[in-house]
Image: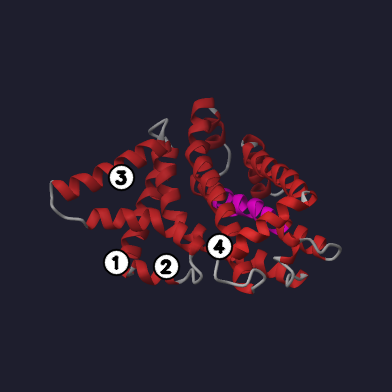
Amino acid sequence: MRPPLFMLEKELIEHKTITRIPLFILLCGAVLFISLMMNTNLQDNVFISVETQGNFTPFSSEFSNDLQLALSFVVGILSLALTTTYLSKTLRKERNEGSSAFWRSMPISSQYTHAIKLAFGLIVIPLIFSALVLIANLSFWVISLSSDTVLVMLHEHISFMSVISNWLQFMGRMLLVSVVMLPIAGLVLAVSQVSNSPLIILLLGGYALKLLSTWVLNWDGIAVFLTHMYKIPTTILLSSEPLMSFSQAGIGFLSLYSLLGAISLFASISLYRT
């Protein structure tokens, strides 16, 4: 087996929650969907509520697009949460267990180890969660071929090509989120090697910097920077035009943000060698 595949498999074995959480969500979603499809009275109530509370046609493509955006947002947020948790634990777990010394003795560079962990957190985990979006759309498509229930009528325009298209759009959004998350990932990896609670340190440190810069220095530059840093991933997931998030952030923010990521990644690699 090639070293990259072996190392990715190792991460998957050591962090089993990455597969168990999506499977649990899939099981709960299947039970909820089946019970909803079997309860015709509940379907009619949902249909009436949607029809009377809005000023749009219930079966319009705009409404279906909103549902797809909501589904992508929920799954994307879950993927982001699991990615952040994984990045905060992976290097710390190796240090606590003493396995980091073993892996440093192997003919694998620190840069290569970081590349594998970043690829696993920013690519493999979103790919696993994308299966939820694909399975959800496939379920609606299969049922729409053999059922005329109200819930399926909300997706009556769906086709197999639209299922694949929605999945590819979700993967495109998550790819942009992964690019945006790269500096944050480097920062989390660096802090995780000097603290047992890197997420708490980053959260409290960020708010402390915002308050100190605003109250003491009377300058809101740091507050604006941190706000952009925390908001841009969710903006990409929610926006109908994800690329607009980059232009709204500005060249200055993106340059400083990239510099912060490069410094954090360099610091993490240096700490990993000790």
Query: Which residues are drawn in magenta?
Result: 119-134
Classify mark 1: helix, strand or loop. Answer: helix
Q: Please rate how many residues cluster around mark 3, counting C-alpha atoms within 10 Å: few if below 14, some from 14 to 19, many from 20.
A: some
* Residue 163 percent coordinates (x, y): 72, 66
Q: Counting residues from the N terminus, which is met first, the one under dot 3 or under dot 2? A: 3
* Residue 97 magenta-highlighted: no
Query: Can residue 68 be seen by looking at this rendering?
Result: no
Q: CA distance from mark 3 to mark 2?
A: 21 Å
The reply to whether discs 3 and 4 touch (Cβ–Cβ < 8 Å) is no
Q: CA distance from mark 1 to mark 2?
A: 14 Å
| Mark 3 or mark 1, whichever is nearer to me | 3
Q: CA distance from mark 3 to mark 4?
A: 40 Å
> What amino acid does circle 3 point to?
Gly
> Residue tagged by mark 4?
53
> Residue tagged by mark 1?
252
Classify mark 4: helix, strand or loop. Answer: helix
* Residue 127 magenta-highlighted: yes
